[in-house]
Structures are given as structure tokens and as C-alpha cells.
Amino acid sequence: MNRRIGLVGEKYAAFFLKTNGYEIIKNNYHTRYGEIDIIARNKREDCFIEVKTRRSIFCGEPEEAFTSIKAMRFYRSIMEYYKIHTPCSWRVDLIAIRLNSFEELEDLRHYINVQLF
């Protein structure tokens, strides 16, 4: 169930990014440290995007799920990505999504260049 909600959120996030001029490079990039939900390019900058999706705020806002432990794993995943790909300017973005009970988009917040540590 949680995975399905996450995938729905990632689809909304990818649509939002494309609509705003981002080129999607890869979805669900897996490394030994974890997963990068979306890798996109905005002009000449790689954007590593974590998507957090919730159907209610009972357990907190989606942004609160991007913990320091998750941030460290995310950073390590980015470094693994650059072992295979040519390094360039990059940043980390966070997209927080809230869905209604019908899994329709209720709110989307895009945080650009979030600090990992």
C-alpha cells in the first residue's frame, strides 16, 4: 500500500517537473545505499529528487520523513551515481505531496537545493 502511494506521488512529481521544464533522466535509480526517486536535469544542473507522499498528516507532513539518516543514504547514492556517470553541477530537491483519499493531488511543494546535513 505505501509503495503504491509512493509511486502515485512520483508520477505527480514527474509530471510537475516536466511541466516546469525539467528533463527526466531516470526514475527509481537503485544503489546499495537506497533509491533516488527521480534524477532530472534543469538546464546544465543534475537534480536528485526525493519525493515524499502522504494521504494524511496524521503521521506528520511529508517533508518530515526526509530524516538525517535518509539524507546520508541519499548523498551516498548520489556519489554511487557519479562513479558511473560524468560528474557535473548538481543539487538535491525535495518534493512533498499530499493526496486526498481518492489519491488525487491535494498539495505539492517543491523545495529546491535542500541541505543534506
Image (spheres, grey):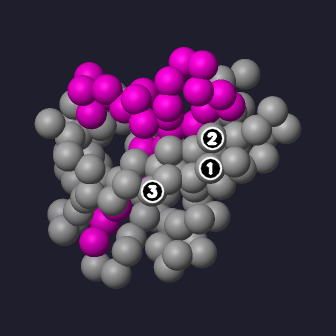
Pointer 1: what residue? 107
* Image quadrant where one finds the C terminus: top left
Q: Position of residue 70 (x, y in %)?
A: 32, 28
* Image quadrant where one finds the N terminus: top right
Callout in the foreground (3, 1): 1
Q: Residue at x 60, y 19 (%)?
A: 58
Picture quarter containing residue 71?
top left
User: For residue 110, which numbered disc appears in the image?
Assistant: 3
Mark 3 is surrounded, within 10 Å at the Cα level, by few (under 14), some (14 to 19) or many (20 or more) other residues, namely some
Q: Position of residue 60 (x, y in %)?
A: 50, 24
Mark 3 → mark 1, Cα distance in angstroms: 10 Å
User: For residue 98, which numbered disc appears in the image?
Assistant: 2
Q: Residue at x 50, y 31 (%)?
A: 61
In depth, the one of 4 and 83 nearer the eye is: 4
Mark 2 → mark 1, Cα distance in angstroms: 5 Å
Q: Residue furthest right?
A: 102
Q: Is residue 103 left or right of residue 14?
A: right
Label 2–label 1 contact, CB within 8 A: yes
Q: Position of residue 3 (x, y in %)?
A: 64, 28
Mark 1 is surrounded, within 10 Å at the Cα level, by few (under 14), some (14 to 19) or many (20 or more) other residues, namely few
Q: Is residue 50 visible?
A: yes
Q: Amino acid at mark 1?
A: Asp
SS state under label 2: strand
Q: Is residue 48 left or right of residue 95?
A: left
SS state under label 3: strand
Vertical placement of residue 65 versus 115, above or below? above
Q: Is residue 52 magenta?
A: yes
Q: Amino acid at mark 3?
A: His
